[in-house]
Image (cartoon, grey):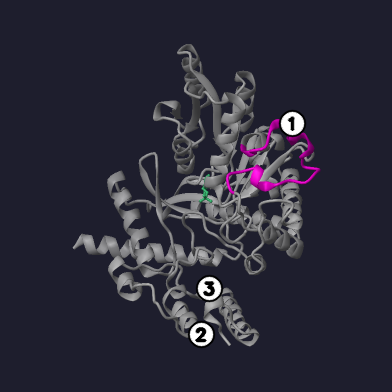
Amino acid sequence: MTKKHTLTLSKKEMQEYGYRVVDTIVEHFTTQDEKSPIAMATRQEMDRLFLEEAPENGMDAQKVLEFVNENVLSQVAITSHSKFFSFVPGPSNFISAMSDSLATGFNVFSGGWAVSATAAELEIVTINWLLKMFHFPKKRGGGIFTSGGSMANLTALVTARRQLCGDNFSKAVIYISDQTHSSNIKAIRTIGFSKDQVRIIPTDMEFKIYTNKLLNAIAKDKLEGLQPFCIIATAGTTNTGAVDPLLEIARICKEENMWMHVDAAYGGAGILSEKGAKALRGIEKAHSVTIDPHKWFFQPYEMGCLLVKNHKWLSATFSEKPEYLRDVEGNESEINFYDHGVQLTRRFRALKFYMSIKTFGLSAFREAITYNIALAEELEHSIRKSKNWEIVSPANLAIINFRYNPIGQNFNEKKLNWLNKEISHRVVQSKKAVLMTTELHGQIVLRMCLINPRTTMQDIEDTLELCIHYANEVLKSTAT
Ligand SMILES: *Cc1c(COP(=O)(O)O)cnc(C)c1O
């Protein structure tokens, strides 16, 4: 029987409850693509459904589950939906979802070796897989799993600052581009840099950082007596998938004795495909790289990762132990991951990565990622041949930006911006697909991020047809 004061259920009750939960998840996995990928509600509607005081007395477990099923889980955005094209989708996979349940079920503490050697070992092993993928040194290199890319970027910046500035960072300057992900700016602010310690360098026509302007800014800052110490390059910008000139940035960092951090939260996984590997050339020169397994490595939330060239940089930054004890620790000896990052108590993130790669094999990931890149390229070709559409930023690591601009209509820029915004708005309102806009060089464009391996060309064509339908509807309604 349920014993409330110990928060326990009988074995039979747990089984009934647990099977119901698994059935619910399986049902979701098998029907998600037929559901609507987005849910919209106002705060008022939500409050009406859920707002209440914490109930003093509990109720039947199955009833709570049913309520959550009907009212919560039925009203979430499905970022793993094959027609969820916006932001960065989270395609996820069933094995990892179940692995996460195991890690939670066993409540594995993943902070220190002494408590959970296996958890630490699996983190070492999977980080080693990633080090190899990114051509980082296996012996000297290291890394840590984090809640996401934001936390990985923050961890990188704290490490870089520790290594190059020590305690006095009042003159330190960080360089980013106008396409750098906002999480970096958040991290810079969080760790106590002021606004004047950041230079936002413009990007070129392809949204890559202008290295000439970067060099000018560094030179100026040096003349002012400041300390240029870190460049954050992006390998796969969230907007367009553009990759900054990594080899050039590596050269600058070497010459100027600066830290090269590469934010590859979005695009990093591309390295598993031939084309992606080519686009990411130079990433191996970085001091640190952020990747985000909960994006294009198909892991459920939350899972980010920071890789570093030298694992000692992490322990030297985050360990609270004296220096002379650190030498016994290395990638080849026991690692306490609480010494390699901010968190002490950590969930067992490595397990899902480990189990999904063991189950599907790395080749499955490689195929999925290669497919995604090819899909975006196929879409680019088909758009170039169409009278209705115009490519604004070509297929880049599975991201593509385009707009409705039918030949012969000669719509002006203002009208095109308005029209494409309207198209996106109506598609989203239809709840049949999630296709949002972004702004590139002043143009409002439709953006597709195609990292779901279950998305087909048909899904895309259906969505484009829907767009044209709404475009005609909008134009008709304003013509009269
Ligand atoms: C998504 C993303 C981030 C932030 O990662 P989270 O996992 O959302 O914290 C950082 N940088 C880039 C380039 C991204 O695409």
For label 2, the SS is helix
Do tag 1 and tag 3 residues touch (Cβ < 8 Å)?
no
Residue drawn at the location 30% of the way across and 67% of the way down? 42
Q: CA distance from mark 2 to mark 1?
A: 55 Å
Q: Is residue 422 magenta?
A: no
Q: Is residue 321 magenta?
A: yes
In this view of the protein, can residue 310 be seen by the observer?
Answer: no
In this view of the protein, can residue 229 be seen by the observer?
Answer: yes
The location of residue 247, given as percent across then percent down, is: 64, 29
Q: Which residue is mark 2?
A: 62
Is 11 on the left-hand or right-hand side of 126?
Answer: left
Amino acid type assigned to the residue bearing label 3 in the image: Gln
The location of residue 358, given as percent across then percent down, is: 76, 62
Above or below, 254 relative to 245? above
Is 366 on the left-hand or right-hand side of 411?
Answer: right
Q: Nearer the viewer, residue 4 or 273?
A: 4
The segment highlighted magenta reads 318-343
Q: Which residue is mark 3?
A: 32
Q: Nearer the viewer, residue 18 or 23?
A: 18
Q: Quadrant of the C terminus?
A: bottom left
Q: Nearer the viewer, residue 449 or 320?
A: 320
Is disc 1 surrounded by few (<14), some (14 to 19) or many (20+) residues within 10 Å? few
Outermost residue on the front side: it is: 5
Residue drawn at the location 76% of the way across and 44% of the way down? 132
Above or below, 269 relative to 54? above
Amino acid type assigned to the residue bearing label 2 in the image: Gln
In the drawing, what numbered circle is on residue 324?
A: 1
